[in-house]
Image (cartoon, rainbow, N blue to C red):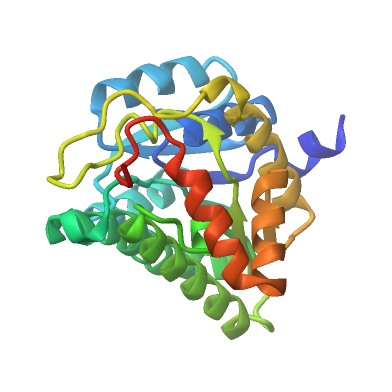
Amino acid sequence: MKIMDRFYSGKVVIITGATSGIGLATAREFASHKSKLVLAARSEDKLKSITEELSQKTEAICVRTDVSIAEDCRRLVETAVAKFGRIDILVNNAGISMRALFKDLDLEVIKKLMDVNFWGTVYCTKYALPYLLESKGSIVGVISTAGFKGLPARTGYSASKFAVHGFLDTLRIENLHTGIHVLVFAPGFTASNIRKTALTADGSQQGETPRNEGKMMSAERVARIMLRSIRLRRNKVILTPISKTLIALTRIMPRITDRIEYRYMAREPDSPFK
């Protein structure tokens, strides 16, 4: 049996935002190693279809969950424990993005992003924490380069990801002696549907992605790196050369990096800067 199979076989894993992109790829990767899956998302039809697919490989259940609602997150955790008796890994992946200048932005858009991206992570982590302390398990927060460096025209997205980053960093320090593992995982630009569902200034979905998805890291590769990072109990992982370069340059020459970043983001098709 391979190392990854030995490590993950039988582990109980909750994944939010499990019906597309990184969440779906991560669910499939865990299933390939025979983990027991609890899949969460808002779309019940998609959840059922994916659960049926993954049930061919491992035990899997789904729980329709809106992570912005605390009671939904409590029910998700309670259902997982009722079915499998424990929780070993929580992957806080559910999230939404946005693209608009702050001066044009309806404030409800930022509130929605904070409710899903930040509070969804807080709620799920709060209710799962007692069980993860018992198993000395792992909490994963899927953030973004935007959780390390503010991205123009993504004020709400960056704010929510910075908040998750700070929350999980603090949680890790609080639990230095409990045996629990906390991973801040920043994929960078990944081929997924998050840009298609990104919110515009008035809260409507953007539709077509402004970027060439084919040139981005695949969600499947991101999932493989995530599982390896969990097994190695890493604290923080930043993916893609662009993200690593941006974060490094920000420390050395922040003003110049701001200008570079502005020009880079302004080149997007239909950029709000134009």
Does 211 appear above or below 9? above
Does 83 appear above or below 197? below
Tag count = 0
* Horizontal and vertical percent position of residue 21: 47, 30
Q: Answer with the quarter of the image where residue 139 lies.
A: bottom right
Question: Residue, x 50% and y 48% (percent of image)?
Answer: 263
Q: Is residue 143 visible?
A: no
Question: Residue, x 34% and y 47% (percent of image)?
Answer: 79
- Residue 106 horizontal side relative to residue 90, left or right: left
Q: Answer with the quarter of the image where residue 158 lies.
A: bottom left
- Residue 116 horizontal side relative to residue 152, left or right: left
Q: Is residue 45 visible?
A: yes
Question: Residue, x 48% and y 36% (percent of image)?
Answer: 23
* Horizontal and vertical percent position of residue 12: 56, 45
| Residue sitting nearer the eye, 218 or 78 | 218
- Residue 204 horizontal side relative to residue 179, left or right: left
| Residue sitting nearer the eye, 7 or 192 | 192
Question: Residue, x 60% and y 46% (percent of image)?
Answer: 187
Q: Answer with the quarter of the image where residue 2 lies.
A: top right
| Residue sitting nearer the eye, 106 or 4 | 106
* Horizontal and vertical percent position of residue 89: 57, 52
Q: Report the quarter where the C terminus lies.
A: top left
Q: Report the quarter where the N terminus lies.
A: top right
* Horizontal and vertical percent position of residue 96: 33, 45
